[in-house]
Image (tube, rainbow, N blue to C red):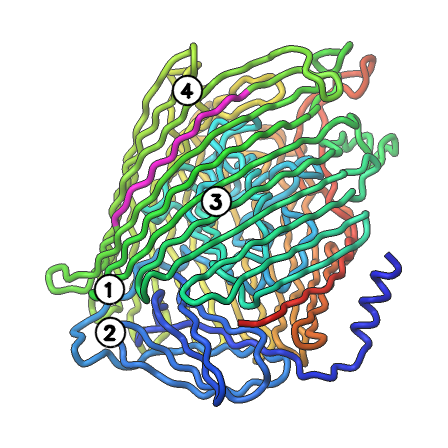
């Protein structure tokens, strides 16, 4: 470790004999300022030329450039090409948006890709993931913010607990659900061993490979179905890397280490890479976490022409860990238990998963696009937990094992058609989805990590097929946009030796955006969407008289503006959720909850302070969340009503880049009837910095929880007995957040393309 620190110090202190590399990035825009998803950006000097095709969000990026003068040329079908001259300084990250001004003479009209209307959508680009050191996989999801509060439930490798809009989504799949996709592959696992919609597969995601993230703040797009009630997070990975070789080595306290190695060949008409990520940490726990992850990721894209491509992806991940479990906080407060202590040293888990997928896309001369993809996935999951200690079995204890073995397959198709509707410019998007799960799921009492019996066990088969259509029309010179969509999902729940039950649901969508005057950069918005989340197949078959699909009606209205260096949006929302059946993991039973209602507001802002510094942040405030009906008011519990985030970002300031980030939640109730039982809130600051040492070498450092705040990531209220002869106590149990965690590393980016 001393050699490692000395090497870092030597590299930082050494004179920068070569000029620091620079970056040029930005978007391709149409004359109305809308992004163009299919454009070609060419970067030229007197001796060389590079070309970049914009991604689906209109973004381009050229990295590892020498300081100097460059010529940027942007080309897109239907527009007259434009050229810009750009000069960049050493270490500078220049942001250059390329806005087309004229249509080609032969073009009568052109409409760019339809998207969900603000304030329903957020974006994150690759820069925040590429320049930040992540030593824990849960930090990737925490970067998204956008009103999402995510916390570790066991202090180790288990999936994060998700809270949003005043609802606890458990691990992502109940109370409306938060749908997460990686390259169109759904990550939420239905009828999972640890609960509906489990998101543990995200641990195989390497942040350096993330291209961009789209966040839809509600069920407003017909493209997404199951688990989309409270929004969608769509993560897209790169097809290639800017350099042929990328190597990142990092280490820190708590016996933390991580490596990332990728090779991306510079081949004509082929974009490809193969990457490996390995990490290990013990964490601050008295029972060391021994959390080991190994991920292998690969992509191969063949550009058949400028408008057509086909690709293949491969992913393999495995992780093994021990965990502290959730600790009785009354014992921590009295000093009987260390806040980083444990009650069962055998808690933890092990996971293996693999996915192979293919994708195809084609753009036509009239602006239409077609895309299709398919995937096959296999996973093995074992989780060892003990929530209540000796509550139910004072002799052997309540420790149990949850097992999930599954085979998944799926496919998606989508066609986007640009056309005229009664003389108006319009975009029609239609498509279909198919997702199939074959699952062996079980719950077993255990002694250590050896099962001693069977509590429940089932072979489940869950199939989901869907079709959708969505139309967006522009009126009054594009000042009024009206969209509407319809989606139909059919489910087939089959549990061997118990029975089969079908279910189906229609979902409507509606969007409107109106700009009263082009002279005033102000747009009014209204969005409505019905989202759904399926119920665990075991509950559907065991309780066929209860609803099999939960529906979420999401209403949102707001205003957004953008002028000069300032962007701002605010909206009010109302959410009606129909019902829920929640899996109780320690005994394999199901609890019925619902219907519920929540309402509140969100505000988001972004300010470009200078060329190098920007400030952005957001606040989500839930005014109320409660169960409808009954003889008295019962409130929704276990989720904060205030979630805030902010970030001060530095890009290319004398060779330095980085961000100071804040995330905060308020205290929140843990019992629907008793307002005195509450979880504590927290405010946590993280700092990440990177410095170009010399061409191709970058120093990175991160300070997580830089103020060393004592806090708990998740807290729950339930009965437990901590010893065979102890009393049964209703108490709050919590998972401690990490203290100050310092990680430093070196990134090598070699042989730029």
Q: Which is nearer the N-term, disc 4 or disc 1?
A: 1
Is there any visible trace of residue 339 in the rendered image? no
Q: Distance between the residues labelled 4 and 3?
A: 23 Å
**Left or right, 294 with reference to 373:** right
**Left or right, 638 with reference to 15:** left
- Secondary structure state at the residue bearing disc 4: helix
Residue 434 included in the magenta stretch of the image: yes
Taking the spot 68% from the left edge, 16% from the top edge, the residue there is 451
Tell me the residue that label 2 is attached to.
78
Is there any visible trace of residue 730 in the rendered image? yes
Label the magenta part by its dominant secondary structure: strand
Q: Looking at this rendering, what residue extends furthest in the left direction?
A: 422
Q: Distance between the residues labelled 4 and 1?
A: 44 Å
Viewer-proximal residue among 187 and 178: 187
Tell me the residue that label 4 is attached to.
540
Q: Distance between the residues labelled 3 and 2?
A: 34 Å
Q: Position of residue 96 (x, y in %)?
A: 47, 78
Residue 304 included in the magenta stretch of the image: no
Q: Which is nearer the N-term, disc 1 or disc 3?
A: 3
Q: What stretch is highlighted in magenta?
A: 430-441
Say if mark 2 contacts mark 1, CB within 8 Å. yes
Taking the spot 75% from the left edge, 47% from the top edge, the residue there is 738
Say if mark 4 contacts mark 2, CB within 8 Å. no
Q: Can you tell which mark lies on residue 367? A: 1
Q: In which quarter of the image is the N terminus?
A: bottom right
Q: Where is residue 492 in the image (x, y as percent from the top left)?
A: 34, 24
Tell me the residue that label 3 is attached to.
180
Q: Which is nearer the N-term, disc 3 or disc 2?
A: 2
- Secondary structure state at the residue bearing disc 1: loop
Query: From what the image shows, is residue 593 above or below residue 236?
Result: above
């Amino acid at each position: 470790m001393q050699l490692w620190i000395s090497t870092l110090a030597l590299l930082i202190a050494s004179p920068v004999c070569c000029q620091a590399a620079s970056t040029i990035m930005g978007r391709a825009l149409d004359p109305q300022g809308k992004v163009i998803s299919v454009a070609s950006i060419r970067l030229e000097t007197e001796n060389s030329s590079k070309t970049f095709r914009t991604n689906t969000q209109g973004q381009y990026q050229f990295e590892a450039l020498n300081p100097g003068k460059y010529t940027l040329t942007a080309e897109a079908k239907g527009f007259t090409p434009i050229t810009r001259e750009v000069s960049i300084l050493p270490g500078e990250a220049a942001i250059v948006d390329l806005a087309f001004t004229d249509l080609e003479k032969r073009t009568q009209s052109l409409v760019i890709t339809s998207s969900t209307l603000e304030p329903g959508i957020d974006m994150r680009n690759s820069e925040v993931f590429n320049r930040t050191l992540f030593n824990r996989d849960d930090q990737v999801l925490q970067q998204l913010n956008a009103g999402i509060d995510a916390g570790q439930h066991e202090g180790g490798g288990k999936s994060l607990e998700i809270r949003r809009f005043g609802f606890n989504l458990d691990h992502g799949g109940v109370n409306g659900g938060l749908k997460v996709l990686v390259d169109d592959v759904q990550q939420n696992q239905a009828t999972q061993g640890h609960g509906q919609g489990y998101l543990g597969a995200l641990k195989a995601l390497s942040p350096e490979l993330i291209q961009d993230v789209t966040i839809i703040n509600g069920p407003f797009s017909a493209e997404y179905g199951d688990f989309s009630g409270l929004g969608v997070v769509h993560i897209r990975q790169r097809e290639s890397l800017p350099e042929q070789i990328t190597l990142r080595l990092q280490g820190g306290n708590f016996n933390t280490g991580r490596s990332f190695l990728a090779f991306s060949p510079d081949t004509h008409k082929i974009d490809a890479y193969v990457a490996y990520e390995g990490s290990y940490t013990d964490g601050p726990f008295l029972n060391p976490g021994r959390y080991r992850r190994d991920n292998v990721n690969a992509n191969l894209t063949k550009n058949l022409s400028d408008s057509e491509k086909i690709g293949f992806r491969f992913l393999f991940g495995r992780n093994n860990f021990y965990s502290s479990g959730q600790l009785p906080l009354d014992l921590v407060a009295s000093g009987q238990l260390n806040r980083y202590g444990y009650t069962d040293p055998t808690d933890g888990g092990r996971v293996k998963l693999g996915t192979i997928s293919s994708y195809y896309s084609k753009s036509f001369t009239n602006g239409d696009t077609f895309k299709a993809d398919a995937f096959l996935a296999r996973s093995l999951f074992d989780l060892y937990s003990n929530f209540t200690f000796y509550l139910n079995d004072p002799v052997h204890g309540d420790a149990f094992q949850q097992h999930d073995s599954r085979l998944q397959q799926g496919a998606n198709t989508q066609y986007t058609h640009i056309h005229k509707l009664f003389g108006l410019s319009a975009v029609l998007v239609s498509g279909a989805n198919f997702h199939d799960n074959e699952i062996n799921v079980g719950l077993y009492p255990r002694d250590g990590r050896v099962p001693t019996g069977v509590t429940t066990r089932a072979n489940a088969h869950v199939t989901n097929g869907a079709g959708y259509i969505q139309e967006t029309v522009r009126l009054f010179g594009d000042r009024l946009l009206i969209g509407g969509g319809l989606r139909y999902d059919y489910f087939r729940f089959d549990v061997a030796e118990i029975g089969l039950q079908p279910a189906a649901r229609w979902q409507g969508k509606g969007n409107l955006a109106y700009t009263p005057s082009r002279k005033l950069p102000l747009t009014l918005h209204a969005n409505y969407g019905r989202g759904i989340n399926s119920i665990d197949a075991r509950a559907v078959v065991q309780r066929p008289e209860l609803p099999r699909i939960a529906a979420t009606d999401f209403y949102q209205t707001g205003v957004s503006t953008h002028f000069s260096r300032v962007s701002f949006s605010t909206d009010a929302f109302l959410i009606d959720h129909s019902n829920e059946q929640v899996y109780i993991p320690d005994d394999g039973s199901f609890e019925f909850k619902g219907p519920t209602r929540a309402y509140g507001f969100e505000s988001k802002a972004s300010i470009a302070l200078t060329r190098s510094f920007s400030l952005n942040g957001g606040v989500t405030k839930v005014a109320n969340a409660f169960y409808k009906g009954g003889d008295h008011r019962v409130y929704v519990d276990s989720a904060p009503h205030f979630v805030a985030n902010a970030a001060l970002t530095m890009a290319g300031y004398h060779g330095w880049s980085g961000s100071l980030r804040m995330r905060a939640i308020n205290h929140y109730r843990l019992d629907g009837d008793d307002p005195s039982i509450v979880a504590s809130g927290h405010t946590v600051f993280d700092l990440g910095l990177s410095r170009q040492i010399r061409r191709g070498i970058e120093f990175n450092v991160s300070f997580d929880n830089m103020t060393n705040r004592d806090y708990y990531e998740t807290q729950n209220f339930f009965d437990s007995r901590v010893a065979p002869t102890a009393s049964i106590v209703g108490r709050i149990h919590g998972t401690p957040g990490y203290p100050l965690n310092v990680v430093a590393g070196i990134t090598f980016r070699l042989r730029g393309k």
